[in-house]
Each structure stands twice: as structure tokens, then as C-alpha cells.
Amino acid sequence: MRAIWKGAITFGLVNVPVKVYSATEDHDVPLHQVHDKDGGRIRYRRVCEIDGEVVPYEHIDKAYDDGERTVVLTSEDFAALPAERSREIEVVEFVPSEQIDPLLLDRSYYLEPDSKSNKAYVLMRRTLEETDRTAIVKFALRQRTRLAALRVRDDVLVLQTLLWADEVREAAFPSLDDEARVTDKELAMSAQLVASFEADFTPEEYEDDYQAQLRQLIEAKLEQGDALDTAETFGEQPEESEGAEVIDLMEALRKSVASSKSSRASGGKASGSGSGSRSGSGSGSTGKSGSGRASSSSGKGSSGSRSTSASKSSGTKEKAASKPAAKKSTSRAASTKEKSTTSKTTRKKASA
């Protein structure tokens, strides 16, 4: 797991440095949209309404429109907010655990000690266990002030963000105002039914039937040959992550080696050093892009794969060079016979 946030739990004069990790993950089968006519990939672009150009994610800001005026807010504006700069998980109060309505629970995070000694962490954990209390805390995460419940799960401190009171809708159903007469016999029979289903809850025994059936369907289609050739359908192009150019590692290395050999063959001490610089730039760009592909692009500040201007330039050139190669590979099989006929005609003319 990768830490998404670092800070410290504070209550009174006690300070507990921690790292925050997402405690849950999505297990759904990843799907994308295609054209039903030919299976072509459907892609969405961020286009500026003024100049019609596609805008890279790193050049997109947020704005508020009150109907007459628009206020543009940059990433620097958000970072300057006092709450966003704070790295404290402030304990507001300790409450009985049963007072927290499960409807308020939102996202869950694991907390790991972030200091040489875990004494303060263990102290906080044991205090919560022995007092049978849950700590209500406030902190800032991803441009929002969060209210959360801090509790213990298997010797690990867990942070569960809570919805604000005004985010929970009121259940106002007029049909519940009508009185319904339930007899003692009906209630007794219902209790017997509950007793027949009684068991200890074991989450591991349950499976997402829909996702399991979806994977089974995909495997069956692959085995029956009911699938499209990905390279021919989408083209052999490097995948694009949010706001980052992704370059094929082997292709970048091959081009770097070829460039280095041609520079040495041409001789010249100066040109050799220049080649080394270009090769280094290429591999550096590839390394950063590779890192970007592995990370989650949860937002503007989380892509983690932005290169320097030199690396971006190198990445753009390589990407542009790879597109013709992708197009050639998809049409190579179709044009083999035509190339062979042309070659024979050329040799006849030459012999004549």
C-alpha cells in the first residue's frame, strides 16, 4: 500500500505521528466504452470552448459561477487555505461507540505509526480499547475538512470519515404514518424465522455474484474466439493516464541505444556527449512516465508523473514517432501481397 497522507493525531499535548492508507479498494472488472458498430474505442477529451483545443489536465483550474461573474481558483489558491495546510488530526471529543450512527460512516483508512517509537500510537490504541470510546476528530484531506471516527480494529487505528449532519437526508415517508396492526402470533412466527437464519457474520463467505458472472462471461467469449484484436482495433498506441504521457519502456530503450550507436559511429567527442545527454533525457522521461502509470490519478496534484520540459519534449517526439509504426503494423498483413507484386515488377524493369 502507498500512504496518501501524513500528519499527526493530537489530543491535549499528546502528538501521534501517523501515515494514512486507504483501507478499501474496488474489485469491479475494468470496462471501457466502444462503438457498437466497429468496436472502436470511445475516448473523452477536455476541450476548451473558446479556442477548441484539447487541454492537458495540468492546465485545468476550477471556477465558481454565481450566474453573473466567474471566479477562477488555482491549485495555489486551494493550497493557501489554512485548513488545507494543516497536518493535524485533531481529537475533538471521545464519545460512546454506540452513539455513532452507521449511516454517517463514509470512507475507511488505516493509520500507521510514523516515528521511530510507536509508544504514543500504542498509548492511543489502548486508551480507546480500555475506555470503550471512539474519538471524534477533524482534519483536512483533498481540499475538504473531514469529520471522522477514530477507533481500533485488530490492533490498528482506523479512521472512518463521517458525513456531515446536513448531508444525511430525512426519511419522511407519509405511508409510515398509517397504523398497521401486528398480532402477537405474527410477531412470534417472525421471530422463529429470524432464529432459523441466525449465524455469526463472516464477510469472507460472501461473493460479488455479478462481478463473478461478468468475469465468467468474458472468459467464455475469449475461449470461443468472440473477441476483437486489440492492436488492430485500437492501434498499438501507448496508453494515456490522467495528465501524463505514457511511453513504452522497451521502445524508448531501443531508440536510445540506436541513437547512441549512430552517434558513436559518426565520431566526434562533442556529438558523443550530446548523444549521452539525449539518451539520459529519454530514459529519465520514461522512468517518470512509468511511475505515473503505476500510481492512481485521483486528481491534479496526484498524477506524480509530470516531467521537466525537456522530458516532455522527448516523450512527445517518441510518442509521435510510434504512431506511424502502429498504423503500419495494423495494415502490414493486408499489404504483403501488394508489396510482393510491386517488387517483382521492379526487378523485371531493372533486368530489361
Image (cartoon, grey):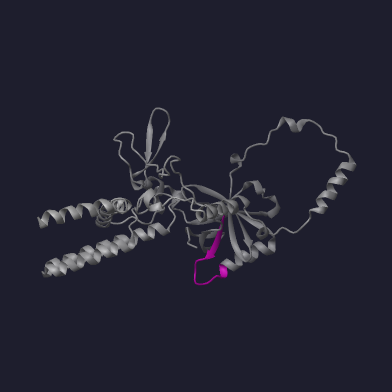
Viewer-side residue, 346 vs 254? 346
Single out the residue that lies furthest toward the front.
352
Q: Quadrant of the C terminus?
A: bottom left
Quarter of the image holding residue 118? bottom right
Percent position of residue 78, x then y? 41, 46
Percent position of residue 312, x then y? 28, 54
Single out the residue that lies furthest toward the top.
68
The answer to whether 89 appears left or right of 337 in the picture is right
Q: Residue at x 29, y 35 (%)?
A: 51
The answer to whether 220 appears left or right of 237 in the picture is right
Can residue 157 be seen by looking at this rendering? yes
Q: Residue at x 67, y 63 (%)?
A: 129
As drawn, 260 above or below 307:
below
The answer to whether 279 appears left or right of 182 in the picture is left
Viewer-side residue, 303 vs 113? 303
As drawn, 1 above or below 168:
below
Instruction: Reply yes or no: does residue 257 show up in magenta.
Output: no
Quarter of the image holding residue 65? top left
Magenta stretch?
A: 108-120
Percent position of residue 9, x then y? 54, 60
Instruction: Reply yes or no: does residue 119 show up in magenta.
Output: yes
